[in-house]
Amino acid sequence: MTTAIANDRLKQRFDKWDVNGDGVLERADFTQEAERIVSAFGKSMNSPEGQATLNAFTGLYEYLATQAGVGPSGSLTEDQFIAVNEKLIFQDGESTFNRVLRPVMKAVVGLCDSDHNGQIDANEFAQWLKGIGVSESQARSAFQQIDTSGDGQLSVEELLAAVRNFHFGKLDVALLG
């Protein structure tokens, strides 16, 4: 794993989440990302799944902004975003990474999980990735890589590992958009 790969992927994520292109991330950018994902599933922001997704993404923003020292109503520059995430990925350890990102993964699973079994299958996963701009063939390939248990279902834990693997350069599909 290299910091260069992680930095490149964090820059890509920053650019994607900087919805209005103003060079900073604000709470509104994370709100709009949540709205985009919820809308891709045909859900209302007022639904329990919509609210869980919104809360997860704004909670993620608040964590990042607080760690960067700008506070929950501040703005994150690209350099601040990268520095905070590098610390989260490389220094804070897996348990902190999982604690910070688990609400986002749980919210997305809640949106995808049409049979309400707490996991997502290949079709539900493909729908999620389609919502963030990934082709169905890429989604099917990624599913096979991520399903480490081989049970045809993705758990929150498998998804958290996949997000880490993306940043470490071991997976090429960005699950968080």
Image (cartoon, helix red, strand yellow):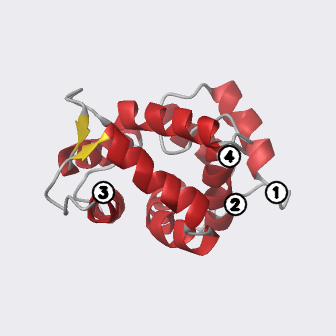
- Which residue occupies the foreground of this view, 30 or 90? 90
Give, as a three-letter code, the residue at label 2: Glu
Indicate which disc, 2 or 4, sits on the residue closer to the N terminus. Answer: 2
Q: Are marks 2 and 4 in contact (CB under 8 Å)?
A: no
Q: Height in image: 37 above or below 164?
A: above
Q: Which mark is residue 168?
A: 4
Is residue 120 in sight in this rendering? no
* Residue sitting nearer the eye, 47 or 26: 26
Q: Amino acid at mark 3?
A: Tyr
- Work out whether mark 4 precedes mark 3 in sequence or the reverse, and give the earlier one: 3
Name the residue located 25 percent from the left edge and 53 percent from the top edge.
45
Q: Quadrant of residue 140?
A: top right
Callout 1: helix, strand or loop?
loop
> Would you say 1 lies left or right of 16 here?
right
Q: Where does label 3 land, which residue? A: 61
Q: Are marks 2 and 1 in contact (CB under 8 Å)?
A: yes
Which element is circle 4 on? loop
Query: Is 131 on the left or on the right of 134, as rendered?
Result: left
Residue 148 circle label: 1
Q: CA distance from mark 4 to mark 1?
A: 17 Å
Q: Residue at (82%, 57%) from the top-left corner?
A: 148
- Pick whichever of labels 3 and 1 is earlier in the sequence: 3
In which image quadrant can residue 25 be found? top left
Which of the two marks, 4 or 1, is nearer to us in this view? 4
How far apart are the two marked residues, 4 and 3, measured between alpha carbons?
21 Å
Seen in the picture, residue 177 relative to 86 is either above or below; the reply is above
Q: Which residue is mark 2?
A: 158
The amino acid beneath tag 1 is Thr
Spatial separation of the CA atoms under disc 2 and disc 4:
15 Å
Query: In the image, what residue occupies the spot 53% across and 38% down?
Result: 7
